[in-house]
Image (cartoon, rainbow, N blue to C red):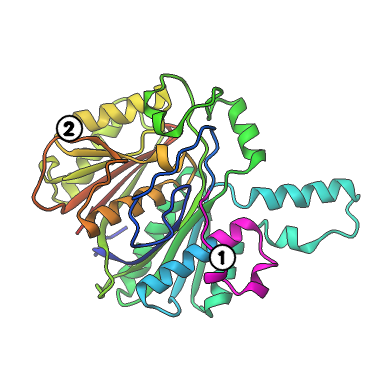
Amino acid sequence: MEKTGPYYINGVGIISPQKTFDPDNFLSEIIEYDHNVLTCVTPDFKAYINPIQMRRLSHMLRIGLSAATICLRDSGIKSPDGIITATGYGFLEETAKFLNEVLNQSEKQLTPTYFMQSTSNALAGLVALTFKCMGFNNTYASKGFGMENALIDGMMQLNQNPSTSLLIGSYDEAADVQYKASIRVGHFKVEYINNLRLFETKTKGSIQGEGSAFFMLSGNKSSSTWCAIRDVHMVYKPEPGELKRELEKFLSTNKISAHDIDVVVNGASGDVDHDIIINDLIHQVVAGSMEVRFKHLSGEYSTSTSFAGWLAASILKKQNIPKAVMHAHRRSPKKLETILVINQYMAKNFTFILMQR
């Protein structure tokens, strides 16, 4: 992609396992969990969704539509020029309901709602209908790189027309069917833990999370701008030494030195094997920067990069790092100007995102 950026985040809306739905509340109250599945703390949906419309929507569609509504209100835009969504596994609960009905009723007299709300693009379509957006509409269902692909698609669109405003978001749910399948292959921990002690554990697996986050992205600044995204880069199944080379190349391409990075958002997940890779990378390349972590608050899920992006954008806008996410305090710049997000999903999908104030 020929980059012209930067790309400005002019609005944010996020619903997660923490109380993040209020843009003015930045992790002032932390929710603790004593089990391994973190579910969304939801607002009063009636504040964002017509009650008549809401009764027909699944729980995750309510969460996604509310997050998109919060983002639009924050940006001051009534209708975006385009919508791009991302997911790892889609609406698994609705898919399971549909398939169970197919089996139990021998494919007769099926409820169409379950099928319609199980497709991965159901949220993008719902948001478009709600806000009368007739423009570009796309959905990426690409496991650990879903949000990254959505961001890059949006950046490419803005390279052609910087004045447009694109609503870019993600969703993934902590579905019981996914949890049972994932725990068999060691994705999640067998023993129950307190989420705030995630990084004290020395065992395999992480904790399940979920959430939906939306960002209003544009090539132009506005009065509601949070920060800018400079660049996004992905590395899949890296060979030994490849991650370090790719990160150094990423910083060099963007004319940024390691010393310029004020904060690193570390996507460590509490998995003793996976965390070694990302922690070694940070130690080798950006060891002098402050380090924050987030998956003890959000849990691990395919599009957790969106939670990392919200955290980085909030730090840059509010010039404050909550105690709950601080992991290593190495130096204290007068202003927090540049943040590097380094996320990983199951030690296969690695992401670098450069964000600036």
For residue 143, side relative to residue 156 (left or right): right
Residue 48 visible in the snapshot: no
Rendering quarter of residue 77: bottom left
For residue 105, side relative to residue 92 (left or right): right
Q: Position of residue 68 (x, y in %)?
A: 48, 66
In the depicted structure, whether residue 148 falls above or below residue 111: above
**Residue 47 belongs to the span the image colors magenta:** yes
Q: Position of residue 150 (x, y in %)?
A: 43, 58
Quick one: 147 or 74, which is closer to the camera?
74
Q: Residue furthest front?
A: 29
The residue depicted at 52 percent of the width and 77 percent of the height is: 131
In the depicted structure, whether residue 267 falls above or below residue 134: above
Q: Secondary structure at mark 1?
A: helix
Rounded to the nearest whole Å, what is the CA distance between mark 2 and mark 1?
42 Å
In the picture, which quadrant includes the N terminus?
bottom left
Q: Which residue is mark 2?
A: 287
The residue depicted at 36 percent of the width and 32 percent of the height is: 238
Q: Which residue is mark 1?
A: 45
- In the image, the segment drawn in magenta is 40-63
The mark nearer the N terminus, 2 or 1, is 1
